[in-house]
Image (tube, rainbow, N blue to C red):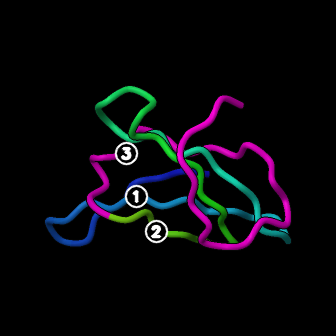
């Protein structure tokens, strides 16, 4: 589940994975069409996305169970 949250005046974005294994998520970044988007391997629990929350439009599961946590690749069709 992707979500935004605020701490004082700052906004952040994160993805919370509730399953038992690592999985790959598609991260939809504002601006630039799909060229700015990327895929990220996340561990169970909350993963904060880098930078400011308003830079993100969405993040969603695309598979890849068992990937190495933190691995980031450019957007590819899925």
Q: Which element carries disc 2, helix, strand or loop?
A: strand
Pointer 3: what residue? 56
Which disc number belongs to residue 13?
1
Residue at horizontal 61 percent and vertical 62 percent from the top: 16
Q: In this view, does 5 lie to the left or right of 63?
A: left
Q: Which element carries disc 3, helix, strand or loop?
A: strand
* Distance CA(mark 2)–CA(mark 1): 6 Å
Quadrant of the image occupied by residue 17: bottom right
Residue 24 drawn above or below residue 50: above
**4 or 49, nearer to the observer:** 49
Q: In this view, does 19 lie to the left or right of 31?
A: right
Which of the two labelled residues, at mark 2 and mark 3, occupies the earlier sequence position?
Answer: 2
- Which region of the structure is painted magenta? 51-78
Local packing at callout 3 (Cα closer than 10 Å; few below 14, some 14-19, many 20+) is many
* Distance CA(mark 1)–CA(mark 3): 7 Å
Pointer 2: what residue? 48
């Amino acid at each position: 589940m992707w979500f935004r949250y605020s701490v004082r005046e700052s906004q952040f974005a994160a993805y919370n994975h509730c399953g038992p294994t690592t999985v790959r998520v598609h991260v939809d970044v504002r601006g630039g069409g799909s060229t700015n988007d990327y895929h990220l391997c996340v561990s169970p629990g909350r993963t904060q996305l880098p930078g400011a929350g308003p830079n993100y439009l969405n993040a969603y599961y695309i598979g890849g169970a068992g990937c190495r946590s933190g691995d980031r690749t450019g957007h590819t069709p899925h």
